Amino acid sequence: DTLYMASTSGDSWRFAATPLLEIHSVVYWLFLVYIAFFLFVVVNTLTSIIIEATITNADRERHEIIQDELKKKASYVNSFKELYNRLDADGSGDVDLEELTKHLHDAQLLAFMESLE
């Protein structure tokens, strides 16, 4: 009885239930079952709302993370294309050893390489 009162916010339900006990114990127990059922419904509803909101936010965050990674990848690809075009001084479409060694000490090339994750 005390445990039930503590889990349902005090004595407020007891004031309503006491007269029912004087009428008949079955009515009293039906009232208690009703309160318990109602509390379970409320708690389960609130829990499901919270869980659904959490799942929705997690999906949205995951989608945003994927979009950010795709943007980052596209940026890296563009940066590598620019770098490759810069290294390919003769425009042949190939970077030979001479072209590569010519740019090895280029400050922009070194800064770009260091910026890669």
Image: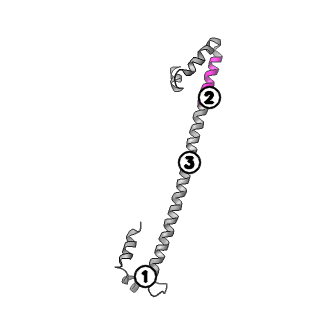
Tell me the residue at 47%/84% (across/down). 94
Q: Is residue 92 above or below residue 56?
A: below
- Mark 2, secondary structure of its residue: helix
Q: What type is the residue that disc 1 sits on? A: Leu
Residue 37: numbered disc: 2
Q: Is residue 111 above or below residue 62?
A: below
Q: What separation in Å lies between label 1 and label 3 (alpha carbons)? A: 47 Å
Query: Where is residue 74 drawn, in percent x and y?
Result: 51, 69
- Is the C-beta separation of discs 1 and 3 under 8 Å? no
Q: Earlier in the sequence, mark 3 or mark 2?
A: 2
Range covered by the magenta-colored residues = 27-39
Q: What separation in Å lies between label 2 and label 1 (alpha carbons)? A: 74 Å
The answer to whether residue 37 is left or right of residue 88 is right
- Is the C-beta separation of discs 3 and 2 under 8 Å? no
The answer to whether residue 106 is left or right of residue 56 is left
Q: Is residue 35 magenta?
A: yes
Residue behind mark 1: 87
Task: Please rate how many residues cluster around mark 1, counting C-alpha atoms within 10 Å: few if below 14, some from 14 to 19, many from 20.
Answer: many
Residue behind mark 3: 55
Q: What type is the residue that disc 2 sits on? A: Phe
Q: Earlier in the sequence, mark 1 or mark 3?
A: 3
